[in-house]
Image (spheres, rainbow, N blue to C red):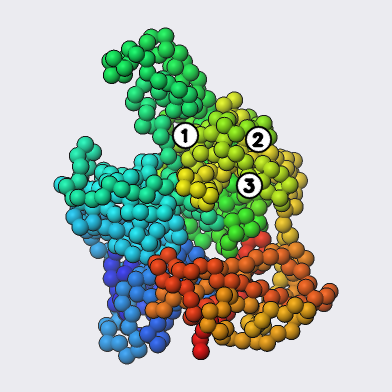
Amino acid sequence: MRLEITTEDGSTSAVDVAGDIVVIGRDPACDVVLPDDAVSSRHAELRVAGGEVTLRDLGSRNGTHVSGAPITRPTRVGVGDRFRVGRTTVAVIRASGAGSTDQVFHTMVESRPRASGPRLRVESSDDTSAVGREVPIAVGGVIVGRGQGDVRLPGDTHVSTRHARVWLSGGSVWVEDIGSTNGTYVGGASVHGPRPLADGESLTVGHTLLRVVGAASADVHGSPTVAVPVAGTPAGLPGTAARSRWRSPWVAVAAVLVVLATGAGVAYAALHGESSAPTSAEHSSGGSSTPASGRRHHQRRSASISDLVRRLERSTVLIETQHVDGRSFIGSGTIIRKDGIILTNAHVGDPTAEGLGIQYDEAWTEAANRKIVVATIVTPDQPAQERYRAKLLASDGYLDVAVLQVTSTLDGTPVDPATLDLPAATMGDSNDLASGDHLNVLGYPGEGGGFDRIINYSNGRVSGFRPDSTLHTLRAWVKTDAPIAHGNSGGLAADDRGELIGMPTRVDTDTGGPGPVQGRIRAIDTVKPVIEAAESGTPYVSPYFVHTTGRERWKFRSFAAHEPTTSCSYRSTGNYPSGTPGVIPVYRASGMAPGEAFRVELFYQPTGGARPQPVGAVDGTWKRAWGPTSDCLLAPVRVQASELDDGTTVGDGAYSVQLEVGPNYTPFGDPEAVTIGGG
């Protein structure tokens, strides 16, 4: 078996090992020894059997991750697949079966010099196994995509099969979007046609940030010498999703930067959407002059919005979290009291908060925070400085809100909150908003400078509101066209009075039309009960879902050939007739609270050893369907996808179902296999 090892600094090496079992860890007795302090002594194991390679975690401290998620059971990996142990990424380059004559190497991984010339490096991604990988950029180009290309990102579901192309031309690096669903972004703007990239400049595809390294500065005034189509698919921001969150940067489209060079008056119009048609004098001089009175008027108003933004910046903090599994993330927050109380999203401040799975409709398996660091702006126009550590006071996963308290300085020295005098934002009233109102959004999106602790400002209008029957309100969310990106999560959204009206939280990719995506801001009025509980020291328990009992037990019984209607009586099957639109798994439950959430996800197994792909799901709440002693759950789940992202048709073949239980849809037990049309 040949493995490619990529260390945290991006260096790679190839390791050949023999035998049917390969143990990876820090112990010198392991087959592959990794000098990574986040790797356990005996961390993971690869087994070869029947031409297939299976990966198993060996009870490691930080877990073994495939496609960004820790594995909890043996997982099949194919040639080209990547997984992460500690801070090291391992790829299976060649698989060997029993009896291989490959030489056995019990060796430390040695770094190999990086390739010279321009390269494309994966800085961060939902597909964590790809992070740190570098690919040389050639004249012929590099294709970035989820299912195809030179940079493959199968773990980032917001990347299209063929998403973007990066190539070398005339000594410069160029990028173009190649018809992706969610668009390609550079410097906060979507790419429509060829666009030059300078050395060190980054681009975003889906939830992945890539950077050009080792290249001479691009000639931004030139054009590529390779003929390429200028057409592209205009798209809004990459879509949110359950795990969209803040794990990797999204972009914030700050269109105002484009117009600032044309004068203060135009800049103000861009910020506030007012008309600023040039006067006849401006037309006659090509727009190079502006009447003095008009210029002074616009300069004064621009200064006003500038002062407002400067004040809001001081109340917006960067939150850096380190999970117990060793991964680190960035998000944003807002100081809401001068004694160090901070408002943010639960997926930033408390990533294990119950209810996040229901809110984002997916199995939520994030690890808890080990450390929360707060960075604040000390000097205007300078990066935020890491100053404090904080702890969780209260959270609600369904609302996706968390309230934090500053507890110590960065070196661990305790802080008396009464001695703090932090610049707190003024609490507003989201019920006072109306469609068309102007909004100001601040935070630390990764692409907007968050990784360098640079704050980002964007603005837009209230597009409307989204109701939530669970919250009994028509204004659970404020919809906006203001750019919201990864890293903005938990940040500040304020009206033009500078009052806090909500938290940028997510974006919608399905807007019901061809227009851009819409950002969602969690309305501040919906989270005030959580804030009040945190401020008073009262324990907070979310009323919006049934909490886990800790006594849940489930046992898979079989698949039902038909759906019973009067009792849990059915005929078992392991193979449904060809063309059957779905399957009916049957479980026996105990310890569930009435109304507790569950979900069953259906996976299709493509031929050729590829990883199972989700094609359907059903969710519900527990109740005893056939009397007070009934322990039977039937969960009919239909095939909802006709083809996979790579074009593979979903039809007869091998399937499996995964039961997920509780308000975070925690996976319970192993997947259960079944076939449709198996003969």
Q: Is residue 261 visible?
A: yes
Q: Is residue 316 visible?
A: no
Q: Nearer the viewer, residue 606 or 313?
A: 606
Say above or below: 346 vs 440.
below
Element type where label 1 sits in the image: strand
> Which residue in the structure is indicated by mark 2?
430
Q: Residue visible at 83% across and 75% down? A: 627
Please identify, in this view, whether the residue under mark 1 or under mark 2 is nearer the observer: 2
Q: Is residue 522 left or right of residue 216?
A: right
Give the mark nearer the N terminus: 1 vs 3: 3
Amino acid on which disc 2 is placed: Ser
Residue 163 position within the rendered picture, expressed as x and y whole percent measured from the top left: 35, 56
Residue 516 position within the rendered picture, expressed as x and y whole percent measured from the top left: 47, 44
Element type where label 3 sits in the image: strand
Q: Nearer the viewer, residue 614 or 571?
A: 571
Q: Nearer the viewer, residue 581 or 302?
A: 581
> Which residue in the structure is indicated by mark 3?
401
Q: CA distance from mark 1 to mark 2?
A: 20 Å
Amino acid on which disc 3 is placed: Val
> Which residue in the structure is indicated by mark 1?
457
> Crowding at label 1, few (<14), some or many (≥20) Cα neighbours within 10 Å?
many
Quadrant in which the N terminus is drawn: bottom left
Q: Is residue 278 left or right of residue 626?
A: left
Residue 419 position within the rendered picture, expressed as x and y whole percent measured from the top left: 63, 32
Q: Residue visible at 69% across and 43% down? A: 474
Give the mark nearer the N terminus: 1 vs 2: 2
